[in-house]
Image (cartoon, helix red, strand yellow):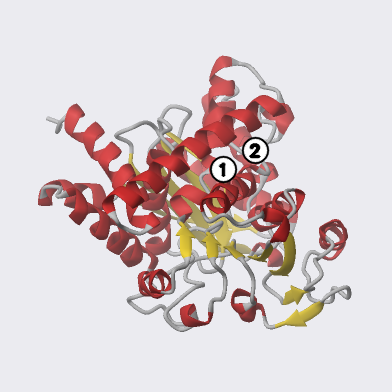
Amino acid sequence: MKTTEEQNPFRIAQMQFDKAAERLRLEPWLCAFLKTPNRNLSVDFPVKMDDGSVRMFTGYRVQHNNDRGPYKGGIRFAPQVNLDEVKALASWMTWKTAVADIPFGGAKGGVVCDPTQLSKAELERITRRFTYEISPIIGPDVDIPAPDVNTNSQVMAWMVDTYSMGKRQPEFGVVTGKPIFLGGSLGREEATGRGVMITALEAMKDMKIDPKKTTAVVQGSGNVGFHAARLLAEKGVRIIGMSDISTGIVNEKGLDLSDIAAYLKEHKILKDYAKARHIQKELILELPCDILVPAALENQITVENAERIKARLIVEGANGPTTPAADDILSKKGVLVVPDILANAGGVIVSYYEWVQNEQREQWQYNVVVEKLTAKLTKSYHEVIDLMRKEKVDMRTAAYMIAIGRVAEAMQTRGIFP
């Protein structure tokens, strides 16, 4: 689908910023500064393929803001990666780290490629060459990448090794989301999904919804979506729908998540999964349910389908899944939307804990990580919900007001160089 102005991710990110900044009454120059990325890096590089041919690939690293700490943000490999998308994701990372009150800024990166059409060896060569291209602007105290769409702990291990070779010494703190035995953190893989579960449970308390009498639909069956579904199910929520790039699956009595996990491990996609009813993947968002977790990509809930959303509570596992026009429709319908910069902040919070462990040459126990994450995200949730009620705004605007206020304070206190 051709990207319209409304669905341009960077334009949406700026619209969300403007709405909150207006409430904060920031000076125009400060708004302009906070909306603008510090650096946009685009690289084009050759990679030798398995058949001996050479292909050119394009990659990006956008560093949005580092007034509160080193740049932080994931690397995604996908065909639709483009500069505006990466700029939007980088800015969302700035607000995400700020609303969670961790000492990082925001960045994002990506490579335009289709990992499903590449061998493991080709993926490794792409990763290593991309890491080499961006290595002058990343580092443990400068900019710390992490996994994102279609990247994982193996990709992070290749990045660590490539960067370390250039430095002639191990630099495990250069990325997060690494394998445990290479300085990764226990609890990191599930952290984003756990954050979705934590914020969903807090919202259910506010709405006086009993998890054990609640149904949920999850768009996406990747790392975020599946862990969110699994952890919600452990709290008694009945998961009745799930989707991936190939299909949507439905079982009103509840999906068997253990069986789905085993199936995905073998088959990768849900297309031929036999133990549920299949529907078009786009219709998964419109199923009758109490909780909807969009955990796929941007621009999934739009002006075209927002009226048909039946959930009472939306918890955004993905970045930017709801357009501003859809936000307005959902607000008028009385739907509570827990915004992405809060709901999916669990990943970057535990990434921060991983970075701290690397800096201290320690490894925390799993229960320590979970307890710290739960306490941190619960505190952030209540800060946002309290401001929402005080200012009589939607939850997204309240989250942005807190985040922008914190970054603006840091920037003004540090001053303008020179």
Above or below 184: residue 43: below
Label 1: state its secondary structure.
Answer: helix
> Percent position (x, y) of residue 5?
32, 76
Locate the C terminus by quadrant.
top left
Q: Is residue 219 left or right of residue 112?
A: right
As shown in the figure, which amino acid type bears the numbered disc 1? Answer: Gly
Mark 2 and mark 1: Cα distance apart in space: 7 Å
- Using the image, tell me which numbered label, if any, was put on residue 321: none
Q: Is residue 72 left or right of residue 33?
A: right
* 121 and 349: which is toward the camera: 349
Find disc 2 in the rendering and name its residue.
188
Find disc 1 in the rendering and name its residue.
347
- Whether residues under marks 2 and 1 lie with C-beta atoms below 8 angstroms apart, the answer is yes
Local crowd at mark 2 within 10 Å, few (<14), some, or many (≥20)?
A: many
Residue drawn at the location 37% of the way across and 79% of the way down: 4
The answer to whether any part of residue 68 appears in the image is yes
Label 2: state its secondary structure.
Answer: loop
Give the quarter of the image for residue 354: top right
Residue drawn at the location 85% of the way across and 56% of the way down: 258
